[in-house]
Image: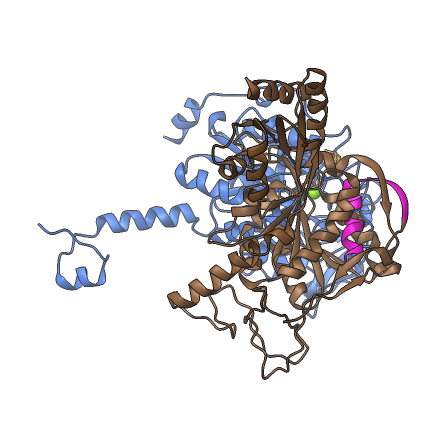
Amino acid sequence: MKMQESASIPKFTRKDLIPGGEVKWCPGCGDYAILASIQKILPELNTPRENFVFVSGIGCSSRFPYYMNTYGLHSIHGRAPAVATGVKLANPKLSVWVMTGDGDAMSIGGNHLIHALRRNLDLKIVMFNNEIYGLTKGQYSPTTQMGQVTKSSPYGVPDYPFSPLRLALGAGATFVARAFDVDGPHLQAILKEAALHKGSAFIEIWQNCVVFNDSVFDPIVSKESRPDHLLYLEEGQPLLFGKDKENAVISEEMSPRVVPASEAPKERLLVHKSGLQDPAYAFLVSGMTYPEFPVPMGIFRNVQSPAYDEILDGQVKKAKAKAKDNSFMALFDGLETWTIN
Amino acid sequence: MAELLYQHAEPEAVLSGTHFMDGNHAACEGAIAAGCRFAAGYPITPSTEIVERFAERAPHVGAMFIQMEDEIASSICLQGAVWGGLKAMTVTSGPGFSLMMEHTGYAAMTETPCVFVDVQRAGPSTGLPTLPAQGDMLQCRFGSHGDYEAIALCPSSVQECFDFMIEAFNLAEAYRVPVFFMMDECVGHMTEKLVIPDAREISVLGRRFTKKPPEEFLPYAPGEDLVPEMVKAGDGYRFHVTGLTHDERGYPSTTLATQRQLVVRLIEKIQRNAPKIWKWEERNLQGAEVAVISYGISARVALKAIELAKQDGIQAGLFRLITVWPFPGQRIQELATRVRAIVVPELNLRGQVANEVERAVQGRCPVVPVGHPGGGVHDPQDIFHAIKEALS
Ligand SMILES: Cc1ncc(C[n+]2csc(CCOP(=O)(O)OP(=O)(O)O)c2C)c(N)n1
Ligand code: SF4
Ligand SMILES: [Mg+2]
């Protein structure tokens, strides 16, 4: 049965996803690499091309749907998760992707984002984090580092930034991951996992804005920095890093701590598990920030819970199955109108 | 009744001198000169330069800028700041302005003096973020639910962005209403000469704080001009601000009598005082056959059309609205009896202000709207043709 189904899905290639026409991001923008990665993995997902829907808000990143030869909805600043909720509920067979920016998702759209995640609706929410408002030309966003001088913070950003991963975890997201623009193979692997996940998936992608926030992630993601400052999370593997994996992350009083690998007590050495129901471990690892810690990339949480559309579907079936009750009490407790025969 | 206390602007805050700057920067300087010491905003083209400049200037003038998470937050945060004791504004453009509508109503209902700046761009929706329009003129008047009156001013030069911003803050304090400073992308981004006068030549209206002792003070008991006096948090008055229908004590009341008394007063305090609020400019209207009524950037384009008409032997003059709301209908009615036709160019297609002109004119002469979808300004030829047609 499964075999037959997949055999009947018309094949398409990466090229079929490129609509032609001009891509209007700045030369060198990290958005290009993310676009290429998504165009690469879509044909591998065993889903007909016409079932993909890309919904975005407003921002440079939110221009994404124009560059995909699929259904696209360029919506309103911050509202993409709510729009996508409507699309997915109206037609659950669609593969619905939300393409959003750090401002779009965390600032004006913060409310919609946390509620979409909380409902565990089957949406893939991909947040391009460049730690800046790109489209409006360089004001600080909720992920810009404290103290950074931007167009709207001439004396330095006075507020504390969000940790997008921790926000998503706090909202109950069942799939939470992070990757970055220029490591294509890693990003593609994460995106594929997200696509296979049933429920809300939140993927933060670090994306370089060459014009208004160039190289902010370089201390972590540049080729030279990676061994010491970046940690790829691998399922079942201990958190080791350094050129020769000479450093380890252990847990101490519910916080992470870096020690030489040779001195790491085995029982406290952190071993990566994304499938834990309790988000405490994911929360701990997602709090590892530069420069104190190597910054983790990968899947922080990947657990199964019934998705909103499944729950709703179950309710519908149950309600329909319930025999019609015409007793006085049923009328009394029920809707405020009834039919007189 | 608390008398209106005008002072001069704070000399340290006023950049007196001759400048070359754009309307957005001038609007920011106007706000600072007017005593605005709090701005809340969320970046949006083509208005962002106003708050960017405010952020830069703030520490030098004892002010504060906060970038909020969106326009819903900005437009209500600023009202908190007003009740905390400061003069405050928020700055936005179309999509952000739409989000603010719940809070423009709150400001009207709670009689919170504050300024909303809208640098209009073409819509609907995201539309043309970088290009001008005048399509929010009804939204600023009617955008929130329920009945209320507001004041809206339209500058049409860089100098006016400065001068009338001060006026906007003064009107907000005088009548305790939200004042809408309705710019457009052209006025916001055009660069011209700006003369900022000496601080002693700038009149700034102080807040109408009560002098009554707390036990006698009724927060919503109006004075003769229908405007109640204010207090601020921290001054020892027990005081509730509420968007619910409230009596003179500021307590919720659900009676028809309270609703009528309150809402009628909110409207009448502006309508009755309208002649004191109105501002307009008349040019060449003496003996004119045609009056062109316009505002903002369109009024400047109209001047060219009036010149073309003159070359064609038609006497046309300009009536430039500075106060659009409350609408100076009386004056326009008089005008309608003296001219053969009225032409109303504006950067929207449904005659947002032209309809109001028509309502005032009541058939005394033909009214010809000259619409435009926004995204640019009129071709003066189009206005000229409308002038010619209006006479035929
Ligand atoms: C209601 C509303 N407010 C403000 C804007 C202006 N605006 C457009 S995009 C944007 C921020 C974009 O930042 P982000 O989401 O991080 O995307 P990026 O451009 O960095 O990819 C803002 C403030 C808008 N379009 N609508
Ligand atoms: S402004 Fe920044 S984020 Fe936007 S397209 Fe240019 S480089 Fe990319
Ligand atoms: Mg961004």
Q: Residue at x 86, y 57 (%)?
A: B199
Q: Residue at x 50, y 21 (%)?
A: A11
In the depicted structure, whether residue B358 falls above or below residue A169: above
Q: Is residue A328 left or right of residue A297?
A: left
Where's the C terminus of chain B, which quadrant? top right
Q: Residue furthest top?
A: B312
Query: Residue B25 placed where, x, y %?
Result: 80, 44
Is residue B22 a member of the stretch shown in magenta?
A: yes
Q: Residue at x 70, y 56 (%)?
A: B169
Where's the N terminus of chain B, which quadrant? bottom right
The brown-tinted chain is B
Front in this rendered view, residue B313 or B111: B313
The blue-tinted chain is A
The magenta stretch is B17-34
Q: Residue furthest left?
A: A341
Is residue B156 a member of the stretch shown in magenta?
A: no
Q: Quadrant of residue B234?
A: bottom right
Q: Quadrant of residue B114?
A: bottom right
In the depicted structure, whether residue B106 falls above or below residue B185: below
Where does ligand 2 appear, by image quarter? top right
Query: Residue A128 placed where, x, y %?
Result: 66, 41
How many numbered discs, if any? 0
Query: Residue A297 placed where, x, y %?
Result: 69, 47
Q: Residue at x 59, y 21 (%)?
A: B386
- State the scheme by which the image is colored: by chain
